[in-house]
Amino acid sequence: MANRASAGYTLGYAAHCLELFGSRAWMVAFLAFSSSFHATATFPLQLATVAAVVNLVAVPASILGNEIALRIGRRRWILVAMAGSGSSGILLGLAAPWHWVIVLGLLVLYSMLVMAESATLTAGLVAAAPAELRGAAMGLYSLAGFAGGMLGPVVFGAALDIAGGAGRLASWAIAYAAIGAGCLAAPLVARSARIGSARL
């Protein structure tokens, strides 16, 4: 972890996985909460099916995000995508009472932003790690991701409970803010630590 760029990508991946798996684990519960505001005008499919479709639609965002990163620079794209996912998660939490079409659109946008930096982080780590340490760097990178993925659902649930429970609108916004905190902080951390460069 002496390589600052590699450390930055690894920490970024941990924050990414925490938000990704935290949001996925609680997606159906959030959709159920949103549905509770509407007696008739609600999601036309079973909520688990809606969540599955949203997750499937979001997958190409990782590939598209990496293509954008090749044009504007990895560091810049990662920071934009992370700030976007963290802030849109809070908006999504507050939007639960809105019409299901708007909620679904925001959910798709949020899920795509969460996925948008995934491939770029991995490509950045491979490019930044010294050749003789690349295997070890990838191992640590994966470990950080698994740790973030394990903690994500727990952090979301704990924040939801501490904020007053699943019946309060503000609690959902706070829970999404909790899992997106690392992504929201990424631009500030990157600015102070100067991880990577504009184009690696």
Image (tube, rainbow, N blue to C red):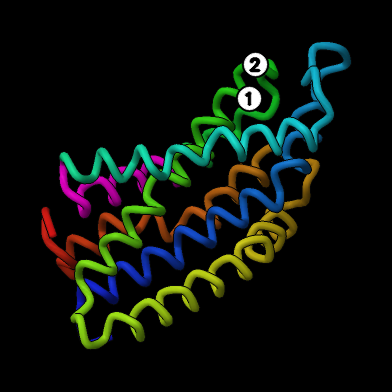
Q: What amino acid is labelled 2 in the image?
A: Val
Q: Where is residue 9 in the image (x, y as percent from the top left)?
A: 31, 67
* Segment colored magenta: 72-86
Instruction: Specify the label residue 185 is tagged with.
Output: none
97 lies left or right of 44:
left
Quadrant of the image occupied by residue 67: top left
Q: Where is residue 141 in the image (x, y as percent from the top left)?
A: 41, 75
Q: Is mark 1 on a helix, strand or loop?
A: helix
Which of 39 and 28 lies nearest the eye of the viewer?
28
Which of 115 and 139 lies nearest the eye of the viewer?
139
Please name the residue shown 37% across and 70% down the image. 11
Q: Residue furthest right?
A: 39
Separation of residues labelled 1 and 2 (CA atoms): 5 Å
Quadrant of the image occupied by residue 200: bottom left
Q: Is there CB contact under 8 Å for labels 1 and 2? A: yes
155 lies left or right of 3:
right
Please name the residue shown 55% across and 31% down the image. 108
The residue indicated by pointer 1 is 104
Which of 157 and 19 lies nearest the eye of the viewer?
19
Q: What amino acid is labelled 1 in the image?
A: Leu
Main SS of the magenta segment? helix
The residue indicated by pointer 2 is 101
Please name the residue shown 34% across and 82% down the image. 135
